Image (tube, rainbow, N blue to C red):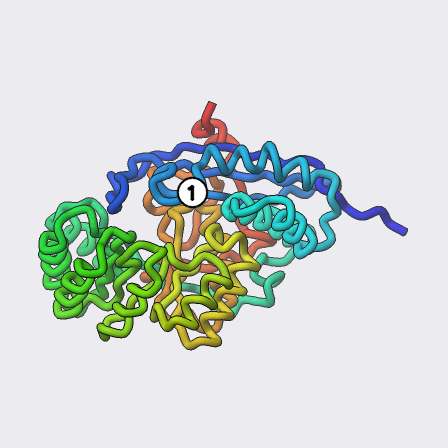
């Protein structure tokens, strides 16, 4: 009887990459994005890649890049090394039972396992998850310079180059009236050529949200993302019921349990799916199943990952029959450079799902060495 293949080594690497411009959110402004790249090597010589990336250190959520690396190095890697690689569900259960929370770290490791298994079998990651239903997915672009004229010019360039025609604006760091003027001016300039959405990143009170959503709905905005604090489920439900414009839960919904609670409370029209928030590809599909059963729309979100994390999301989202609100998988385009040998296929307002084994992307060792944190 053949001995089972086991995990030999796991490495978590911090990589600091500059962004093409300051990226303003309600809680921070990003100029550098830090990726946590995971390399999982098996005793048969196959290596899998994963990525755990968050936004703005600890300004977005409870896991910083440094904490993610520590969770992997000090807790999860010792648990997994020498573990057989025959079952991703066994690997997932082992991590979930031994470590509370830390979904970003667990997601990167689960992705790395799937990448290695796909390479071993010569199959794309999407095939391991049941098979892709889409070969290309639409991609939104976030206008987040904070300057109205600059955002309009950026959107016009995206339209002219057939890069994006779905635009999301990051708001919430200014007065509601100022944000509304900013968004309305951009929507008026773009007209029917593009769809405009907003992300408030939890910045408004319920009263502010009523004021802002009423004006944004009148201006032609089609989607309002996370207008209030993630914990204010009842407020989110009241806003969803009050307005015709779609209200999306992002920070309010991480995994299937969150999704069930929001669905039962009729608290959102759309769920933002993000692999790290859910705790991995399989958990993301569980959340998607809850949304589909409840008639809630789906949106393929991003943590502004580089190409490795974005490829993982593409594979997962490609297996969903319905993805009514498209995706936001533009993370690699926000970076001045990346650490892979060949980028993703961005064209004609969308991005192609990689077709190679596993994730279908490979590290550029020179770029990795250049940008890894010392």
Q: Name the residue under label 1.
A: 62
Measured along the vertical axis of the image, is residue 229 above or below residue 271? above
Residue displayed at 25% across by 54% down: 200
Q: Is residue 80 visible?
A: yes
Measured along the vertical axis of the image, is residue 134 above or below residue 7? below
| Neighbour tally class for label 1: few under 14, some 14-19, many 20 plus, Cα within 10 Å | few
Residue displayed at 68% across by 43% down: 46
Counting every numbered tag in the picture gives 1
Pick whichever, 246 or 267, lies toward us.
Answer: 267
Q: In x, y percent, where is residue 263? A: 42, 71
Residue placed farthest to the top in the image?
A: 374
Q: In x, y percent, where is residue 23? A: 26, 42
Q: Tell me the element at label 1.
A: loop
Pick whichever, 206 or 224, lies toward us.
Answer: 206
Residue placed farthest to the right in the image?
A: 1
Residue displayed at 68% across by 41% down: 80
Measured along the vertical axis of the image, is residue 182 above or below residue 15? below
Q: In x, y percent, where is residue 187? A: 14, 62
Q: Can residue 163 be seen in this view?
A: no
Residue displayed at 47% across by 68% down: 260
Q: In x, y percent, where is residue 296? A: 40, 73
Pick whichever, 342 or 317, lies toward us.
Answer: 317
């Amino acid at each position: 009887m053949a001995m089972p293949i086991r995990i030999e080594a796991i490495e978590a690497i911090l990589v600091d990459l500059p962004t093409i411009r300051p990226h303003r959110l309600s809680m921070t402004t990003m100029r550098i994005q830090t990726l946590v790249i995971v390399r999982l090597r098996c005793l048969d010589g196959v290596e899998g890649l994963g990525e755990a990336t968050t936004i703005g250190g600890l300004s977005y959520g409870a896991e910083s890049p440094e904490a993610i690396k520590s969770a992997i190095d000090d807790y999860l890697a010792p648990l997994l090394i020498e573990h057989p690689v025959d079952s991703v569900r066994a690997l997932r259960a082992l991590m979930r039972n031994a470590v509370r929370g830390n979904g970003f770290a667990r997601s990167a490791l689960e992705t790395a396992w799937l990448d290695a298994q796909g390479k071993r079998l010569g199959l794309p990651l999407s095939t391991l998850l049941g098979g892709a239903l889409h070969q290309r997915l639409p991609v939104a672009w976030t206008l987040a310079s904070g300057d109205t004229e600059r955002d309009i010019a950026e959107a016009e360039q995206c339209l002219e180059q057939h890069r994006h025609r779905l635009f999301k604006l990051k708001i919430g760091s200014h007065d509601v009236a100022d944000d509304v003027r900013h968004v309305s001016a951009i929507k008026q300039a773009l007209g029917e050529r593009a769809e405009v959405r907003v992300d408030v990143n939890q910045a408004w009170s319920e009263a502010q949200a009523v004021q802002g959503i009423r004006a944004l709905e009148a201006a032609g905005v089609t989607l309002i993302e996370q207008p209030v604090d993630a914990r204010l489920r009842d407020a989110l439900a009241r806003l969803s019921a009050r307005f015709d414009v779609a209200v999306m839960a992002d920070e309010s919904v991480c995994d299937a349990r969150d999704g069930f609670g929001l669905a039962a409370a009729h608290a959102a029209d759309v769920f933002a799916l993000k692999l790290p928030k859910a705790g991995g590809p399989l958990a993301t599909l569980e959340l998607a199943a809850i949304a589909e059963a409840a008639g809630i729309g789906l949106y393929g979100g991003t943590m502004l990952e580089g190409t490795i994390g974005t490829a993982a999301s593409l594979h997962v989202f490609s297996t969903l029959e319905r993805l009514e609100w498209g995706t936001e998988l533009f993370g690699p385009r926000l970076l001045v450079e990346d650490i892979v040998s060949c980028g993703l296929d961005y064209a004609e307002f969308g991005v192609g799902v990689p077709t190679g084994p596993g994730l279908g992307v490979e590290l550029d060792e020179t770029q990795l060495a250049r940008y890894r944190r010392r």
